Image: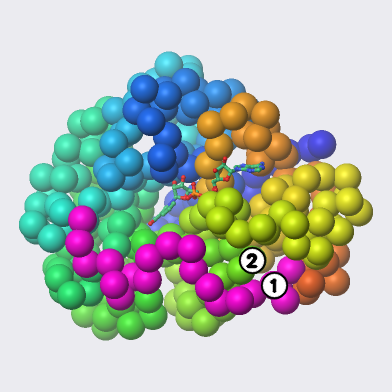
Amino acid sequence: MASSVPALPLNSGTSIPQLGFGVFLVEPKDTQRVVEEAIEVGFRHIDTATGYNNEREVGAAMRASGVPREEIFLTTKLRNDHHRARDVEGAFQRSLDALDAGYIDLYLIHWPMPKVDAYVDTWRTFETFTRDGRAKSIGVSNFLVPHLERLLAETDTVPSVNQVELHPIFQQRELRAFQDRHGILTESWGPLGQGKYDLFGKAPIKDAAAAHSVTPAQVVLRWHVQTGNIVIPKSSSRERMTENFDVFGFELTPEEMAAIDGLDENRRVGGDPMDVNEG
Ligand code: NAD
C-alpha cells in the first residue's frame, strides 16, 4: 500500500508530518532499537518527553539512523516538576543536551497544572526558545480551552499545537473547534485508546477494516488523519509499526467516518488536566 505522510503547516512557518511515532513507556534500554526501527519503517516524526526518560536514546537513534537531522521532526516536553520549580530554561537546555540533536522542532508544556498557575510565565520563557532558534516551534499539551484563552490574551505567541488525549471514544469536538478557529493544530495522544477500550471490537471500526482489507488499528489511525489530527501511535513491535505507518493507501467513506464519529462517549482514559497538578 502506498504511504506518503502529509506535512501540515504550523503557525510558526514550519510544518509537521501528520503521522509520528510516540515513545511513552518505551524502556530506555529498548528505545534506541525501537526508534531506529521506526525510522527504518519510514517514520520521520518522533514524540518523546523529558518524563519518558528516554531522550538520550531517542537522540542516539536519530544519529545512528543516518537520516539527515533536518528530515526528522523531533518533539519533547517540559516535565511537570521542572515546570512547577520554574526551572524552564534549565530543563530545556538539559533536553537539548540529552537529545544532542542541535535543535528541537517542537517543545511542549506537558501539562498546564492549573493549580500551580505557572503556565503563562512558562510560555513567556518558551517564546525565547523560538527567538534564538533552539526550538523551531512551541506548543502545549493537555490544555483546556480556558488555559488556551489565557495564553492568547496574555502572551504574544499562539501555540502551534495542543497535544491532547483523543480517540474515537473521546473526540474533543469543542476543543478541536476552538483550536481550528485559532490556527492551533490538534495532536492526538493515546490515539488507539492505549488499548484500554475494546476499540477494535466496535462495529464501525471492524466493518471498515473488513471493507478496506486493513486492520482495525489502521482504520482508527486513518480516522484521525481524515479528521485532520496529527497522530503519534506507539508500538515496540516492528510489525505493528509497519502497520501503523501504512495508512495512506486507503480512504474511509463519509459514511464510515460518520459511524466512527458516532462512537464518541466523551470519556477519557487518562487524567483530567484540571486534576493533574503534581509530578
Ligand atoms: P496508543 O493509543 O498509541 O496505544 C499504544 C498501545 O497500543 C500499545 O500498548 C501498543 O502495543 C498498542 N498498539 C500499537 N499499535 C497497534 C496495532 N497496530 N494493533 C494493535 N495494538 C497496537 O497510546 P500511547 O502510547 O499512550 O500514545 C501515543 C503517544 O502519545 C505516546 O507514545 C506519547 O508519545 C504520546 N502521549 C502523550 C501524552 C501527553 O500527556 N502529552 C500522554 C500519553 C501519550
Instruction: Tell me the residue at 49%/56% (across/down).
Output: 189
For disc 2, the neighbor class at 10 Å (few under 14, some 14 to 19, many from 20) is many
Please name the predominant secondary structure of the magenta segment in the image: loop
Q: Image point 61% across, 68% down: which residue?
A: 169
Location of residue 255 with respect to 210 vertically, above or below: below
Q: Secondary structure at mark 1?
A: loop
Which secondary structure, mark 2?
loop
- Tell me: 268 left or right of 42: left
Evaluate whether residue 130 shows in this view. Answer: yes
Which of pointers 2 and 1 lies earlier in the amino acid sequence?
2
Q: Which residue is mark 2?
A: 168
- Identify the residue position indicated by label 1 in the image: 263
Question: Label 1 crowding class (10 Å Cα cut-off): few <14, some 14-19, many 20+?
Answer: some
Give the extent of the magenta segment: 260-279
From the viewer's perspective, is 154 left or right of 46?
left
Tag count: 2
Q: Is residue 18 visible?
A: no
Asked if the magenta segment contains residue 230, the reply would be no
What's the amino acid at mark 2?
Pro
Indicate whether 66 appears above or below 147.
Answer: above
Residue in the picture at 58% in, 51% down = 195
Given the image, on which type of amino acid does mark 1 rest? Leu
Image-based side of 160 in relation to 180, left or right: left
Cβ–Cβ under 8 Å for marks 2 and 1? yes
The picture quadrant where one finds residue 220 is bottom right
Which residue is painted at 44% across and 56% down in the image? 13
Counting from the top left corner in percent of width and height, residue 171 is at 58, 71
Q: Looking at the picture, how far across and down is residue 45, in whole percent?
A: 50, 40
Q: Is residue 112 above or below residue 53?
A: below
Tell me the quadrant of the picture where the C terminus can be found: bottom left
